[in-house]
């Protein structure tokens, strides 16, 4: 079965510092990976995804993630964070769920707190 | 216009009651989902429907009964509520069962508190 592991439950950083949120996956077949962000009291929003092609994927707000097959990782990075980036970040993998059905399976989340 | 809307946003009820949560999407998606997020923020899929047909049922107690009157709506009815049902319930949709494309679009959640 495919799964994802987010290695850090909380990551505190100062504003304008770089950040990396770690995600490792386990899969024996083609893998499709996602990062979602959840701001306080809101639903999840898709940040970026890796389906195929370039291993470096970017979001519109400065985040990027690199698919690394040899290390089975999909870490999320941002070179300079803002206070508004404070949120819960979830790594997810698309997983087969019987027949031709699929589901997104999420990691346990990483709370990014950006301090002034 | 809200893409995936859930009602109510908050629900406080007593143990043993029956309650429903409604979800509607205006994206024209074929597939809809219910996820449960517990107090530790862990997200777990409960059900998935594709074009009104149940395709995923993840070992959820049969007190939970989803209903999809059409592909734009997926409601969740819960009988005999228990304390452990307290959580945030998220509805989501995707273009199709592949769930790739634009990924899943989530609603803003329904916070259920059972007292």
Image (cartoon, helix red, strand yellow):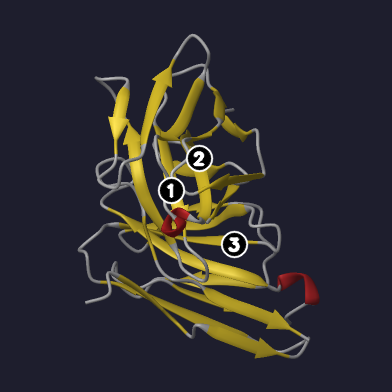
Which of the numbered marks, if any, corresponds to residue B65?
A: none
> Mark 2, mark 3: which one is toward the viewer?
2
Where does the image place residue A29, in percent across and percent down from the top left?
45, 18
Q: Which residue is mark 1?
A: A36
- Asked whether the beta carbons under mark 2 and mark 3 sit within 8 Å of each other, the answer is no
Q: Which residue is mark 3?
A: B36
Identify the chain of the residue marked 1, using the numbered disc in the image. Answer: A
Identify the chain of the residue marked 3, using the numbered disc in the image. Answer: B
Are there few (<14), some (14-19), or many (20+) residues within 10 Å of tag 1? many
Are there few (<14), some (14-19), or many (20+) residues within 10 Å of tag 3? many
Image point (20%, 63%), residue name: B28
Q: B8 or A23: nearer the eye? A: A23
Mark 1 vs mark 3, CA separation in Å: 16 Å
Where does the image place residue A4, in percent across and percent down from the top left?
57, 33
Compared across the picture, whether B80 is left or right of B94 comes to right
Q: Which residue is mark 2?
A: A91
Where does the image place residue B104, in percent across and percent down from the top left?
36, 52
């Amino acid at each position: 079965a495919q799964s994802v592991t987010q290695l850090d439950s909380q990551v505190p950083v100062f504003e304008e510092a770089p950040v990396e949120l770690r995600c490792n996956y386990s899969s024996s077949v083609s893998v499709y990976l996602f990062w979602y962000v959840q701001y306080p009291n809101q639903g999840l929003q898709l940040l970026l995804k890796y389906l195929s092609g370039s291993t470096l994927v970017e979001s519109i707000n400065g985040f990027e993630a690199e698919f690394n097959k040899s290390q089975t990782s999909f870490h999320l990075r941002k070179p300079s964070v803002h206070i508004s980036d404070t949120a819960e970040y979830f790594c997810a993998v698309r997983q087969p769920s019987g027949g031709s059905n699929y589901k997104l399976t999420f990691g346990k989340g990483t709370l990014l707190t950006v301090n002034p | 216009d809200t893409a995936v809307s859930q009602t109510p946003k908050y629900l406080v009820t007593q143990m043993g009651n029956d309650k429903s949560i409604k979800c509607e999407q205006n994206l024209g998606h074929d597939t809809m989902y219910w996820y449960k997020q517990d107090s530790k923020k862990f997200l777990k899929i409960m059900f998935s429907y594709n074009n009104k047909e149940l395709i995923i049922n993840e070992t959820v107690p049969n007190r939970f009964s989803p209903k999809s009157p059409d592909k734009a709506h997926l409601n969740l009815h819960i009988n005999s509520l228990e304390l452990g049902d307290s959580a945030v319930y998220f509805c989501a949709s995707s273009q199709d069962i592949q769930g790739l494309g634009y990924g899943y679009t989530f609603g803003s959640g329904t916070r259920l508190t059972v007292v």
